[in-house]
Image (cartoon, rainbow, N blue to C red):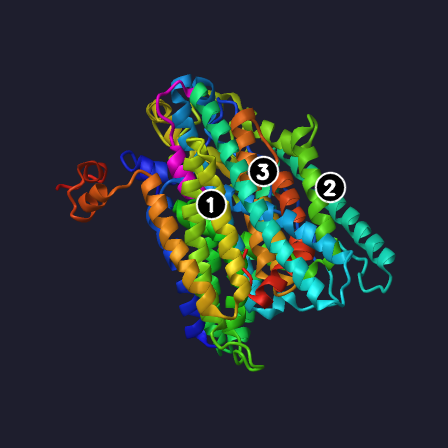
Amino acid sequence: MTASVFFGCTFIAFGPAIALFLFTIAREPLRVIFLIAGAFFWLVSLLLSSLVWFISVQISNKDSAVQQKGLLIFGVVLSVLLQETFRFAYYKLLKKANEGLLTLSQEETMPISIRQLAYVSGLGFGFMSGAFSVVNILADSVGPGTVGIHGDSQHYFLSSAFMTMAIILLHMFWGVVFFDACEKQRWWAVAAVVVSHLIVSCLTFQNPEYVASLVPTYIILFLMGVWAFYSAGGSLRNLKLCLTCKDKDFLLANHRPR
Amino acid sequence: MNASDSDEDFYNERTALVPSENPTVPSYNLDSDPPSDLPPRRVQQAVARRAGPVAADGGGSSDQEVEPDDEELTLKYGAKHVIMLFVPVTLCMAVVVATIKSVSFYTEKTDQQLIYTPFTENTPSVGRRLLNSVLNTIIMISVIVVMTIFLVILYKYRCYKFIHGWLILSSLMLLFWFSFMYLGEVFKTYNVAVDYPTVGVIIWNFGAVGMICIHWKGPLQLQQAYLILISALMALVFIKYLPEWSAWVILGAISVYDLVAVLCPKGPLRMLVETAQERNEPIFPALIYSSAMVWTVGMASPTDALRSETDEAAEQRDREVEPESQPSRGFSEDDMDEDRGVKLGLGDFIFYSVLVGKAAATGGDWNTTLACFVAILIGLCLTLLLLAIFKKALPALPISIAFGLVFYFSTDFLVQPFMDNLAAHQYYI
């Protein structure tokens, strides 16, 4: 419980997300705005699910620990479903806004494509979700204390940080796949996203058995990443061109010689 | 100095230091906060100052000349203006939250209260406490209304010297006295021993440069930084000296007042903005945060000649009107889209920061602070969207404060127990 734990866990949890933000989003005002709007939508979904959970707790038997745990699990599932509903709602809103802008401008191209919006909104969801999950824990890690003094796991902070990183990246991948699936009317893909979100959340019910929860989560993260890569238009050929700096479109766009 | 990437080509020293104005075009205004005066607590003098309304002069003339082809450009530049306001608002809130979380002075409960909130909240009964906070709010709002009307009357009757004196006195107070207090508390928190001569040198330099930057000329970014700092200082004073419930009721009431004052035809703020526009003068720089990049060297001499000006106004005119106003005017009209910045009143900064600071002060929960922060930014975004649609002065407080209050209370009562329970079991949603 020192500064090193604090900084280490902060960078583990938020490092990739902040890097993504700084390198791809920070310079474009429109993307920043849609990121914050995405965060807002996630927040509203959390609010609604907390409201339902709170009401259910008030009318339940507060002394029964089993019942409380059951209600919490119900709260988690409800929250996941609401998050995905709000992702869909955000998609609908963005489509409408884009259509409106397109008709107004009579231009062929929109200032921001639906794929970029998918990426940005997914990252917005991820940022807010990650922040709400881990910021209080990080704040506590600065102060004095001994982790797991009552027999709990000693890896609380580290596992929280890794889990948060996975969740943030997963939200981004889910966003990309979800929007792409909605665009192409592939409802099975939408259902797959919802189911994978549910699986990841339900895996955390096994905590503090971190191996059982973190390893499958990272496997799902990797698979979703690959799926998102392909649905965003990537391919092995693209990847090879990009890595060997031979991708002409990318180089032209960044004014670099080959 | 003038760090705008779109006008590096035509930056020159002249344009950097001149306040922007756009008199002939209907303003792209975002009004927020009435200029009300906030009496400094310690000194208990009549002179106080509240940074005033937001006059957002967006890009005036371009609105009417925008053709359908330019919508995309407008959207891009609209987004840029939103970000130009997000950054200072975020910085101000960050300074306030960082101070609140580290320097305990501003969260210590004290029995001292501002003379504008005389009713104490130390009563045991809930009803009495509520009544006291409502009474406090009524007194505070009436003081603000009276000060605003007084300011507008002074402005209408061209008592510029008085207004300038008033503003200078209140910014003197903020820049020297409050920052001295702040520095003292920071040193106490970190247990740093500093001698008086060093502190004297620091405060003197800080204050003197601040006065020059705010009231006269200075590099744009330095001016912006000072405005952000004094808004943060003022917000911290409010957070310390306003009693708990009174603060929330005051926030709500001031948003309603802002709405009324800016949108009603006879509202004081609206009259202030319209009078300023009629006379082609900028609203006092000490009350407005401006993100404008290139300044139009606007005022052509024919309009000046028509007016009988006082010394102050003439001085102001000389400062603002550089020679050869005509060429620069035509020059800047070509690049209207890039020129226009957006302006936000300092009162908005102050009240946003008060909301977020109070969220950070009460309870150790960071979730509430984050939620309020996002809510306020979204409110600001929506307000700017409305600004782009309606193209006239708009209050910047109501939507943001409404969202902020809703999210504060709901996060504090509903979301926090849920997230605490989840964190205890390490469940992730």
Q: Which residue is mark 1?
A: A193
**Amino acid, disc 1:** Val
How far is disc 2 from disc 3 in space, using C-alphas? 18 Å
Q: Secondary structure at mark 3?
A: helix
Chain bearing mark 1: A
Residue B385 % position (x, y): 53, 32
Q: Decide which of B160, B41 is in the foreground and name it.
A: B41
Image depth: mark 2 or mark 1 in front: 1
Q: Which mark is residue B160?
A: 3
Look at the image and give the residue range highlighted in magenta: A105-125
- The residue labelled by disc 2 is B146
Q: Residue A104: which disc?
A: none
Magenta stretch, main secondary structure class: helix
Q: Residues within 10 Å of mark 1 (few under 14, many from 20)?
A: many
State how many labels appear. Answer: 3
Q: Nearer the viewer, mark 1 or mark 3?
A: 1
**Of the residues tagged 2 and 3, which is closer to the observer?**
2
